[in-house]
Image (cartoon, coloured by chain):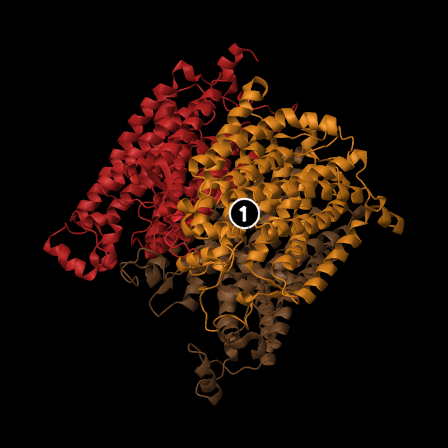
Chain colours: A orange, B red, C brown
Amino acid sequence: MSLKHFLMHGRHIPFLLGIQMAFIILFGVFVEYDKEADSGKAINANATTNEGNTIGHYYPMFQDVHVMMFIGFGFLMTFLKKYGYSAVAVNFLIAAIVLQWATLCQGFYHTFDGRRIHITITSLLNADFASATVLISFGAVIGVTTPLQLAVMAVCEIAIFASNEHLGLEILRISDVGASMLVHVFGAYFGLAVSCVLRRDVSSEKEGATYNSDIFAMIGTIFLWLFWPSFNAGLAEGDAQHRAVINTYYSLAACCVTAFAISALVSKEHKFDMVHIQNSTLAGGVAIGTAADMMIHPFGAMIVGSIAGTVSVLGYRYLTPVVNRRLGIHDTCGVHNLHGMPGMIAGIVGAITAAAATQEEYGYSLYRQFSARAPLAGTPEFKALHHHIEHLEPGLGRSASMQGGYQIATLFITLAIAISGGLVTGLILRLPIFGKVHQDHLFDDEMCWEVPEADHPQLEQ
Amino acid sequence: MSLKHFLMHGRHIPFLLGIQMAFIILFGVFVEYDKEADSGKAINANATTNEGNTIGHYYPMFQDVHVMMFIGFGFLMTFLKKYGYSAVAVNFLIAAIVLQWATLCQGFYHTFDGRRIHITITSLLNADFASATVLISFGAVIGVTTPLQLAVMAVCEIAIFASNEHLGLEILRISDVGASMLVHVFGAYFGLAVSCVLRRDVSSEKEGATYNSDIFAMIGTIFLWLFWPSFNAGLAEGDAQHRAVINTYYSLAACCVTAFAISALVSKEHKFDMVHIQNSTLAGGVAIGTAADMMIHPFGAMIVGSIAGTVSVLGYRYLTPVVNRRLGIHDTCGVHNLHGMPGMIAGIVGAITAAAATQEEYGYSLYRQFSARAPLAGTPEFKALHHHIEHLEPGLGRSASMQGGYQIATLFITLAIAISGGLVTGLILRLPIFGKVHQDHLFDDEMCWEVPEADHPQLEQ
Amino acid sequence: MSLKHFLMHGRHIPFLLGIQMAFIILFGVFVEYDKEADSGKAINANATTNEGNTIGHYYPMFQDVHVMMFIGFGFLMTFLKKYGYSAVAVNFLIAAIVLQWATLCQGFYHTFDGRRIHITITSLLNADFASATVLISFGAVIGVTTPLQLAVMAVCEIAIFASNEHLGLEILRISDVGASMLVHVFGAYFGLAVSCVLRRDVSSEKEGATYNSDIFAMIGTIFLWLFWPSFNAGLAEGDAQHRAVINTYYSLAACCVTAFAISALVSKEHKFDMVHIQNSTLAGGVAIGTAADMMIHPFGAMIVGSIAGTVSVLGYRYLTPVVNRRLGIHDTCGVHNLHGMPGMIAGIVGAITAAAATQEEYGYSLYRQFSARAPLAGTPEFKALHHHIEHLEPGLGRSASMQGGYQIATLFITLAIAISGGLVTGLILRLPIFGKVHQDHLFDDEMCWEVPEADHPQLEQ
């Protein structure tokens, strides 16, 4: 193990140790428990229950989302015959980096008081959401990037993602409870842009599945499908949370049935295609994300889910091959079909639903749902409303259609930032210092794993 | 892909698209959020917490049950060497259909106010319970039915199931918290009746397991075993929920140990048999289901679990081969041993426990547990009791033994409805329009999946 | 199946049936629902919600821990190519035994009132913690022990474990919220001592992984990693629970990144090593366990996690081979590296943090965290403090450094009891009556399973 060898093959080691050390130092300087988790500042020192502590409220859905990130995304990508170790384990590594880095990036925008970032269970949940963004992008470049390239991509992407999230939620004041625009659209187009810049000739017989690898992948699919209501409702509260769970559940059920039907319609001999089942059945969760807590009604959610399932299967069958050939984008997992287009649908559905929201339908909770629609401070409208709603915060006095316009604007701004961010990041990843995957090692665990002797069973099979 | 080919192999496509469209229309006409999930009707528009919203109470157990349906049942059935895709993915499709259809069928009985069905998180949980019924029946016919046949079976079964459930819970007023009679007995005997009508000659070397497929199946087993307390306690509350969790936990633990021991006792060379471990370890969850929230005491639950584990293993070893030969019923997964007989045990145990329930032991919560035992409205007994229990609803003035009789009656009524419903459904499924599995494709994913080239690894092995 | 054959190969059958019967009798005599789960004693017979019932508080984290025991430990051990059935299924059997036996052993120490043990959801959670102890020891002897030996080991170990737990928590009054000393250190060194006594010559080509078995094992790894915050916070409350979740989350994230880096540093060609990824990424969960609910701050947790990840990988790479050679301890899963050394780190970190705890930092909750630090009853200090804290219980008037000393003392007492208990148990397991694994059957499911014909695919591969 000479120095030369280390410089060739071990470059990720100092990078990983370096960022981990940097995270520790930054956490030491900037991060502190919020008062709910701080013994000295706890509301009630006698507290022997969780009353008044938000951990009980957020924890179950947080854990569901946590499972989605590590089991869901990790196993979804194990479908490649010789890339199972990397799929699940590199997913694990990258997500663990992002949880820490996103705590810092999001914390600076959300809870930084000039001296400290204050963390609670919602910081953890937000960091998990952020990791989804990177894991989606991962799907667009899996098999053609080294762990070092992925780690660098993660660091760049999260910084840009957190800025765009801040822009959307706090400056443009839009509603995106399931983060379909801010996470799914962002992650998909960022990843596609990176893939476009890296453009590798990737024709490889290793880019396929085996019988067992497809079943492993279904573990990921099913857990993602099951816990998606927690993803879309995790940050909502009260009736909005209840509604987000219901809408997501029915959107996903409708999407699943439709995706099976369309898959059989467009596949050879009218059989089902595993790629569609593993991915397109989930498109309904993405597509309802933005409007999940709005009054879209169960049948509305089911329409959205059915459309998303259809679009996603058609994308895999007809669009991806064309995009690959024409644009040289190699979208390994088809994230454009699972996250990209369904995320665009989500943004549009969200904007329409927001533009149709009235106080008649939403009651006073309209102003909780769309905070910018509350009247401006000091206006007579604000005073009249404040009479009815004790905790009303002044808003921007937006009309329904203005809110819809801001929603659409955010969708396109997100798209623009994701694509340009991805292009720049792709250029960075092409720097020789970060290495690249040798042609023989595309979609092959041998690149960074010791694979059992005389084994690699999935290939022989 | 000619029209003729479509008519031969693509018949499930219009059916799936058709029912999905029908569901959307029916939801549009009949289904609405209940007030807890309706922004305009939310109890408190200022609400920024979940206080007073039932989502927080039901959601964690709901998700456990959700995992049982899709991961538990889906993977439990992957044990077949060439049928893994179908096991997990067709399970997924059928369950997604049922979630929507059961919402409608159960809603008409439970929450229909003449105009609308009002849905909450408990509607979702009930729909998941309903899907268990169909997935149990699925186990009796897996490998010998087409997806179209299964979808048709699901639609018929749920309509009958919902009627029987209404009869049991709301007319006969019985207690069946873990739905061992209404779901397990119903699903098992319905499926066996269907299997009996379809009676296929199914001797196939494909009906076996491989090393990997057995381990995949254990994923299903373990998740079912772990989350069964949530299944049995999900719809209970307070001390009854607490008790249902405890009883199910110890029943399952005792059942697991006993099933291992009996498996070794009756198997070749006193080895353990994977079929028993995958299935019979779960019988304790079924067998305690009806009495799970009753005062059966932990040791009582453990006795029930031990008996169920023993009966289930003996059923696999000695009864199933005979039933197959004599009645021509091909019970692929042995649902009679896992759900049928243990469900019968549950019904009997529930009846005995109900017949022994006294106010001394249960206190005033006797009338919450067995609502029909509350005195009739207007009687002096009712007035006396109302004095002590503020929210007392008038009942039917049943004695303990009468309640026990109604419990037993419900068991046999369920059995009768399930068997006759299954026979009729089986006849429907034999209509030529629904097609049938070609002899070569029994237990074979090739029937409706594109299996990876030169692969089908589990067979070569 | 002659009697002689039964006596040779069926000895585990009467043992399993016998202990199950004994458990039922002991439960019948001694175990009763606590009032929260007892219908007659329920606080409020009108109760239709979970208010005031602890089931809602504990249940979600309890289920996470439950998943860790059966999916986590079970699948983590499936990495062996020919030992997958045993790993997941014998794990299942042993844990089911322990859940019942630990309820009795821990109940006698915790809730026995002279007549009855009173059980609630926390009894179930504690029994799951206890099962972790045995499953950790299982990892040290997997492949070289029969199921009967393991069941006997479990019975002995839990009796000793419960005594040591009582000594630590109730007599020495130490704080160990994640049970890193009482479960991890105990389980690891107990198992290593047993392994040392059994000392088998275990060079076997079967002791390796295949591609698929490694991916199965990752299911275990990821679920353990995800739910570890629930393990460390499950028995805490309020701000302490919130803090335990945060600390464990960041400790694990830092540990994961560090373990990947160090794995690449010390492995051939700077590749990652699956053994390290499957195990060492979890060391951060163990190492933060004792101090998880203390004011160690996020960056402190990350330092602990990074150190644990490093030590664990180095242990696998350099220490285990030496220990195997020199001491004849065959540590199949490397529990010394995952539970032993990280548990020692946890004990030391906990002692240091406890010794640094001041009332300034913790406020009045200092006396909830470290109950022995409350002043002695009747002293002026107690009276002064009682003025501020309504529910204050008198303590032992310990200083911070005294508490730290007791923490360290408990670590070494646990070590001593575990090692001596393990040595004695190992001698018991060598009694001819319990049989032993034939040399040909080491690490081989054939010993106690009927393996599919012409299959055993993982070997051919």
* Residue at which label 1 appears: A175
Lateral position of residue A204 relative to residue C72, left or right: right
Q: Which residue extends farthest bottom?
A: C380
| Residue C241 drawn at (x, y percent) | 52, 64
Compare residues A355 and A190 and report the one nearer the observer: A355
Residue C197, compared with residue A406, is above or below; it is below
User: Which quadrant of the view contains residue C302?
Assistant: bottom right
| Residue B246 drawn at (x, y percent) | 38, 54
Lateral position of residue C94 relative to residue B105, left or right: right
Compare residues A30 and A372 and report the one nearer the observer: A372
Report the amino acid beneath label 1: Ser
- Position of the N terminus of chain B, as image quadrant, is top right
Lateral position of residue C449 relative to residue B56, left or right: right
Q: Residues within 10 Å of mark 1 (few under 14, many from 20)?
A: many
User: Which quadrant of the view contains residue B126?
Assistant: top left
Q: Which residue extends farthest front?
A: A380
| Residue C219 drawn at (x, y percent) | 59, 45
Residue C266, compared with residue C190, is above or below; it is above
Residue B190, compared with residue C263, is above or below; it is above
Whether residue A447 is visible here, answered yes or no, is yes
- Position of the C terminus of chain B, as image quadrant, is top right
Residue shown at 66%/28% (left/top)?
A: A320
Chain at tag 1: A
Compare residues B149 and B77 and report the one nearer the observer: B149
Residue shown at 59%/38% (left/top)?
A: A343
User: Which quadrant of the view contains residue A243?
Assistant: top left
Compare residues A111 and B136 and report the one nearer the observer: A111
Q: Secondary structure at mark 1?
A: loop
| Residue A328 drawn at (x, y percent) | 75, 30
Whether residue A290 is visible here, answered yes or no, is no
Q: Which residue extends farthest left?
A: B380
